[in-house]
Amino acid sequence: MNTTTKIPATTTTSVRLPEKELEKWTRAANALNMSRNRLILDAVSAYLEQTYHAL
């Protein structure tokens, strides 16, 4: 049986990236001319992935 959970559009998640991580991703985004929202999603995703793999 498949189930789908809808997340309300008003849901927000707060993740605090270390300053050095944020600087690194900001430079990368500027170099690639990425949108700020995409940068944030990619940065948080990569940071959480690194943290998860370090456990």
Image (cartoon, rainbow, N blue to C red):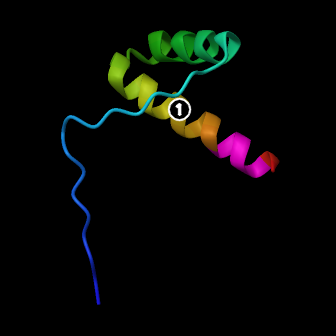
- Amino acid of disc 1: Val
- Residue most extreme to the bottom: 1
Quarter location, residue 37: top left
What residue would you read off at disc 1?
44
Quarter location, residue 22: top right
Residue 25: within the magenta?
A: no
Q: Residue at x 81, y 46 (%)?
A: 54
- Left or right relative to 22: residue 42: left
Decide: is 7 above or below 40: below
- Left or right relative to 28: residue 21: right
Q: Main secondary structure of the magenta part?
A: helix
Q: Residues within 10 Å of mark 1 (few under 14, many from 20)?
A: some
Residue 31, image x and y in percent?
49, 12
Query: How many numbered marks have been drawn onto this rendered protein structure?
Result: 1
Decide: is 47 above or below 18: below
For label 1, the SS is: helix
Viewer-closest of 6 and 22: 6
Q: Which portion, as a residue range, is magenta?
A: 49-53
- Left or right relative to 8: residue 24: right
Viewer-closest of 25 and 54: 54
Residue 45, image x and y in percent?
53, 39
Viewer-closest of 8 and 21: 8
Q: Residue at x 18, y 39 (%)?
A: 9
Q: Residue at x 62, y 40 (%)?
A: 48
Residue 24, image x and y in percent?
63, 14
Residue 12, image x and y in percent?
33, 32
**Quarter of the figure with the N terminus:** bottom left
